[in-house]
Image (tube, rainbow, N blue to C red):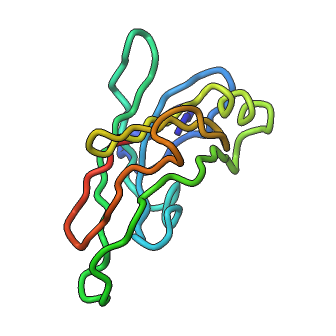
Amino acid sequence: MPVKAIAEDKKSVTPFDGTSLVWVSTYSTDPSNATAGVGTSNNYSDVTLNVADNHALKVDFTVRLKPNSGATAANNLKVTNVRFTATTQSEDITDGLSSSLRVLFVCGENKVVWKHGEYVVGKADSVLADTVTTDDLTVTA
């Protein structure tokens, strides 16, 4: 996420004000809620990867069915939407950033690109994996 500054202890950030820009990442404290704890108690990490004067953040995560749930396989892992939101920035800043951001998802040989609320390009229907089991499946964003 874009912010103005990150605290030295990496526990808090100063909201983006439209002039200074530092990219940071954080994570949810609850696997069933993607925004739980974000912006409150998490550690923030600097986004340091700079690709040809553009900021890029690469994040690997795993997807699997919950063990002992009784399910052994699910079909068609896909991205259904990507939205960029903010609670502390002005609407103009959020809209400006939203229109310029893209997310590339990669899983094995499958790739899809999304922008704010809109599928851009990639495998038909945004399918990243035909089958998901209880084994970890790595997805890169």
Give the camera-side residue of 27 and 104: 104
Quadrant of the image occupied by residue 93: top right
Looking at this view, is 135 or 15 the one in front? 135
Is 48 rendered above or below residue 126? above
Indicate the position of residue 86 as horizontal and vertical percent values.
67, 46
Q: Is residue 107 above or below residue 100?
A: below
Q: Residue shown at 50%/69% (left/top)?
A: 33
Q: Residue at x 30, y 90 (%)?
A: 70
Position of the C terminus, as image quadrant, is top left
Q: Quadrant of residue 136?
A: bottom left
- Left or right placement of residue 134 versus residue 19 in this view: left
Q: Is residue 32 visible?
A: yes
In the rendered image, residue 52, in percent from the top left (x then y), is placed at 39, 9
The residue at the point 31 percent across, 45 percent down is 107
Residue at image location 25% in from the left, 58% down from the top: 137
Residue 6 visible here: no
Q: What is the x, y in percent for residue 34? A: 49, 63
Furthest residue in direction top, as rendered: 52
